[in-house]
Amino acid sequence: MSEQAPAPQVGDSRAEATCGPVRIGPVELARLSREAAVALLLDHVARRQRRAVAFANAHGLLLAMDDAAYARTLSRFLVLNDGIGAEIGARVLSGTGFPDNLNGTDFIPALLAAAPVGTRLYLLGAHPHVVEKAATTFTDRYPAVEICGWRDGYFSPDDEAGIAAAINAASPDILLVAMGNPKQEYLIDRLFPHLEVPLALGVGALFDFTAGEVTRAPGAMRRFGLEWIFRFLQEPRRLGRRYTSGVARYLWNILWLRLRGGQRPSA
């Protein structure tokens, strides 16, 4: 799907020291500092080299362990680490963690803040009023970035060809897709061969956070990869299973992978 061009030489000592990827179950994650990852993706935009990007937390990694189709889809993405679950997996399985926590809700603002003047951004996903408000907020916060279009996330598969055509007509440099995983990664994977955009990223609840529909965790919790606890307390019914039995199953899988040399347990 995406053209996997080699990463440029980035002058970040932490990235150079830990630039080798790590495999957590069926998913290979890049090991980059925030600065190196931003530089890498903006280099793709500048060179018009196409790249699809996903952010993998414990929930996403467990989905890939359970679903071979999702694991194959992620194999066509550059996958960045998100949260304490990915950090634990990397440390247990390889002995080394990640230079930074690259959760998309903090990483995308860093990417847009560093983007050169005239960078064109298209938003896809969320409720109509949410994506529109997110577009307005991005315009206010990042004057160098031009919002060239947006579309809500409520459409049928029959609409996808028209959506791809609309995105191409808007000529963005970066496409953000906010539909939650695995839905957003499957959609990017289907659309990307028909798109001309260099960079497409699955960004989860970013538009909800940006529009002020959902409250972010305190900064200290985010820095230590513990935002999931805050989210669980906000939405215990929706996220309860993910953050209780899901976390337990993820940690069990990581332990099994460590003991069995990378072979995951059967379902």
Image (cartoon, rainbow, N blue to C red):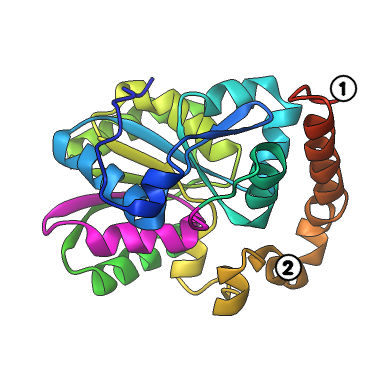
Q: Name the residue under label 2.
A: 229
Classify residue 113 by image quadrant.
Answer: bottom left
Q: Is residue 142 above or below residue 43?
A: below
The amino acid sitting under disc 1 is: Ser
Q: In this view, does 197 lie above or below 128?
A: above
Q: Which of 82 and 190 is in front in this view?
A: 82
Q: Is residue 131 magenta?
A: no
Q: Can residue 230 be seen in this view?
A: yes
Whether label 1 touches label 2, CB < 8 Å: no
The amino acid sitting under disc 2 is: Ile
Residue 246 position, x and y percent, is 82, 47
152 left or right of 10? right
Q: Which residue is drawn at 34% across and 21% down?
A: 193
- Of the 4 image quadrants, the one containing the N terminus is top left
Label 2: element kind? helix
Q: In the rendering, which numbered label is found on residue 266?
A: 1
Classify residue 173 by image quadrant.
Answer: top left
Label 1: element kind? loop
- Of the 4 image quadrants, the one containing the C terminus is top right
| Mark 1 surroundings within 10 Å by alpha-carbon count, few (fewer than 14), some (14 through 19), many (20 or more) | few
Residue 227 position, x and y percent, is 64, 67
- Residues drawn in magenta: 99-127
Q: Earlier in the sequence, mark 1 or mark 2?
A: 2
Q: Nearer the viewer, residue 206 or 39?
A: 39
| Mark 2 surroundings within 10 Å by alpha-carbon count, few (fewer than 14), some (14 through 19), many (20 or more) | some
